[in-house]
Amino acid sequence: MSESNPAGATGRANILLTGGAGYLGSHTYVALWQAGFQPVILDDFSNSDPATLKRLQQITGTPTRCERGSVADTGLVAELIKLQRIQAVMHFAGFKAVGESVAQPLKYYRNNLGGMLSLLQAMGDSACQTLVFSSSATVYGDPSQLPITEDCPRSHTSPYGHTKLICEDMIAAVQQASGAWRTAVLRYFNPVGAHPSGLIGEAPLGTPNNLLPLVAQVAAGLRPALKVYGQDFATPDGTGVRDYIHVQDLAQGHVAALAALLRGQASFTVNLGTGRGHSVLEVVRAFELASGRPVPWQFAPRRSGDVASCYADPGLAEHLLGWRAERTLAQMCADTWRWQAGLLT
Ligand code: UD1
């Protein structure tokens, strides 16, 4: 550990964050700290930057607690849970590039399912059976209705999506086997944005796949133009519509989910989205306004597997958790731009 703080010495409940140095994990680390918890990171840094730990220390004003290692190491996870007196786990660790999962499916099944299996085993063997899991709207496949409610049929269009679906099923199975489990399955829509400090954000290795990091790189002059995939979807301007949600709102959704489980709420599955869809061209215009930079774009053929529209009905999360996303598309773009501009200096 970067700090040998005995469990409980801070008077805060210790929460383990697998993949806690990544994009969603790092923002949730801050939100947990601010809510009075003591987050403890387990990360193998296969897709995250160790420099994030120092940045978290800068934001929280306290040494970051982190163990370098893999969630697939069941013994290590079990030992951490015991020694650190972990009260709940948030499982962020996992690969998430859809295209890569199609090209290298076994890498995804091995990593995402192996990690989940190992974690459930370690938790099942210990006294810690409270789990918050990072699922995804990808489990709705091509959605059968809009807005999407949690009872919509699940399907998958990629090995990545399949791993999320199986992980959800694994959680349901252990829960059925033992009433000791308390679990929250959080289905994220499209997380974007960054911490307002500009110190942490999304730092994809190599070429990004998702819209906002690409738009930010075009605005920064690192890419000549954005390819807008598809112009004839059945949407108001013909481009794809998605439910973009600020990562800060998402992080607060995790804190609300954890708090609900710790106060005895029965296990649940909820959408974390804003309930509002924005088209690709709306995002481009909002980003130009936020950054003051032009974002040149051109139409390109549809990307394989893309659906026309996808947005949440976030009503259940509000009802169960008292949580609602509040940040606007303008804030998402402004915070993404601040982070991107910081990467250039
Ligand atoms: C993708 C994944 C989803 C994952 C989510 C968050 C697919 C099919 N789905 O969702 O499983 O949970 O990311 O990581 O990959 N777009 C462009 N030009 C670009 C990039 C994107 O026009 O260069 C458009 C897309 O066609 C889409 C929208 O922007 O309409 C959002 O794309 P993206 O950010 O990749 O997210 P999703 O495809 O919704």
Image (cartoon, rainbow, N blue to C red):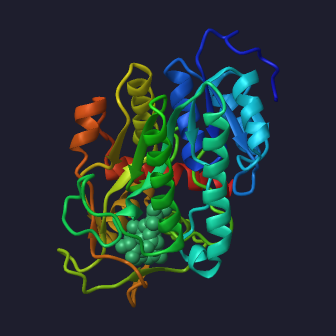
Camera sees residue 198: no
Give the answer, above or below, for where 266 lies relative to 116.
above
The residue positioned farthest toward the bottom in the image shown: 301
Task: Give the image location of residue 254, x and y in percent.
Answer: 45, 36
With 28 as the anchor, is 207 left or right in this view? right
State whether residue 198 is above or below residue 64: below
Q: Is residue 243 left or right of residue 194?
A: left
Where residue 330 sits: x, y (%)? 34, 51
Quarter holding ligand 1 = bottom left
Rendering quarter of residue 268: top left
Question: Residue at (19%, 63%) from the top-left corner?
Answer: 146
Q: Nearer the viewer, residue 275 or 153?
A: 153
Q: Is residue 322 above or below residue 100?
A: above
Give whichever of 65, 75 is nearer the camera: 75
Residue 236 in view of the camera: yes
Q: Residue at x 62, y 37 (%)?
A: 17
Q: Residue 212, how many percent across, how many down? A: 47, 63
**Which one is in front, 77 or 276?**
77
Identity of the residue drawn at 45% across and 37% down: 183
Image location (x, y in percent) of residue 306:
37, 78
* Number of marks present in the image shown: 0
The quadrant holding residue 305 is bottom left
